């Protein structure tokens, strides 16, 4: 679906505030958007596959599972959040000799911007300085992912859960209004995958967080009762890594 005139300013704002396009001027972003479409996905839909060759996707809202497909199954190992640019490896295909297949599935309702790989490459070639900004953004994003892996995979289960709940439910709303009770549609099995733990350990830690008044546990959902405390604890862990 082409970008509607009413949503165009919002899409441009999200692009220009991301690490990927913050150094692009208005004209460059307008040219890029001329070859873009907004696409919507429901929970569990395939959002992007590594064997795509015509487009990249920029996550506008919602979250997507990052998965690795092997011969037997699709293995989940992380979540990508709004402002993530997926498919950037297309810009360096000739350097990859193996072909691990990464797939991305919607965690919940997802809206993405489908970016034409041809148009993006044309923009980079016409203004070589954009290659530099893209490389810098990739380095920043890689370092962010490493820090995120540390807070999700290392430390006490309780602390890792707080970080996961923050990343999954609150980080996308950092610049918006806080909501007293925020409902997250995520199962305990999925949280266990996200922090590389077991469902039993996750359940026990969730009960501890519930007793402390931070969350409330429902059927296939978690309600954040104290977003401010969750955010303070999660950001303290992230900044210490």
Image (cartoon, rainbow, N blue to C red):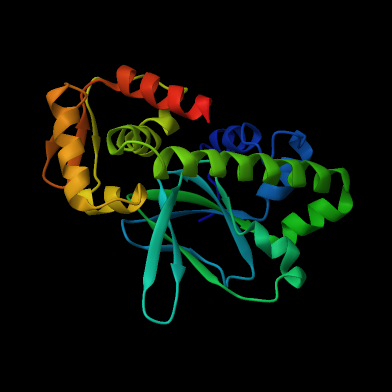
Q: What residue lies at 46% left-to-right and 67% top-to-bottom?
A: 68
Name which quarter of the figure residue 66 lies in.
bottom left
21 left or right of 193? right
* Residue 200 drawn above or below residue 92: above
Residue at the front extreme, as displayed: 155
224 left or right of 7? left
Residue at the bottom extreme, as displayed: 71
Name which quarter of the figure residue 154 lies in.
top left
Q: Position of residue 177 (x, y in %)?
A: 38, 19
Q: Position of residue 233 (x, y in %)?
A: 37, 22
Q: What residue lies at 52% left-to-right and 25% top-to-bottom?
A: 239
Q: What residue lies at 74% left-to-right and 46% top-to-bottom?
A: 134
Query: Which of the pair 209/90 is nearer the observer?
Result: 209
Q: Is residue 5 visible?
A: no
Q: Position of residue 32 (x, y in %)?
A: 71, 49
Query: Which of the pair 9/239 is nearer the observer?
Result: 239
Name which quarter of the figure residue 151 lies in.
top left
């Amino acid at each position: 679906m082409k970008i509607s005139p009413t949503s165009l300013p919002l899409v441009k704002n999200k692009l220009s505030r991301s690490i990927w396009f913050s150094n692009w001027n208005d004209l460059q972003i307008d040219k890029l958007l001329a070859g873009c479409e907004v696409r919507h996905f429901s929970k569990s839909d395939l959002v992007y596959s590594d064997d795509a060759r015509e487009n990249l996707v920029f996550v506008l809202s919602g979250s997507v599972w990052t998965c690795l497909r092997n011969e037997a199954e699709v293995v989940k190992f992380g979540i990508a959040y709004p402002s993530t640019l997926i498919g950037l490896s297309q810009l360096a295909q000739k350097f990859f000799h193996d072909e691990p297949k990464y797939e991305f599935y919607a965690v919940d309702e997802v809206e993405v911007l489908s970016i034409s790989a041809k148009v993006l490459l044309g923009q980079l070639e016409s203004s070589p300085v954009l290659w530099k900004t893209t490389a810098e953004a990739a380095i920043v994003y890689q370092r962010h992912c490493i820090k995120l892996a540390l807070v999700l995979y290392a430390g006490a289960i309780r602390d890792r859960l707080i970080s996961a709940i923050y990343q999954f439910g609150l980080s996308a709303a950092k610049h918006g209004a806080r909501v007293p009770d925020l409902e997250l549609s995520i199962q305990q099995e999925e949280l266990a995958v996200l922090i590389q733990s077991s469902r039993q350990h996750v359940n026990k830690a969730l009960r501890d967080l519930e007793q402390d008044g931070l969350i409330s546990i429902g059927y296939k959902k978690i309600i954040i009762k104290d977003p401010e405390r969750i955010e303070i604890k999660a950001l303290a862990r992230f900044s210490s890594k």
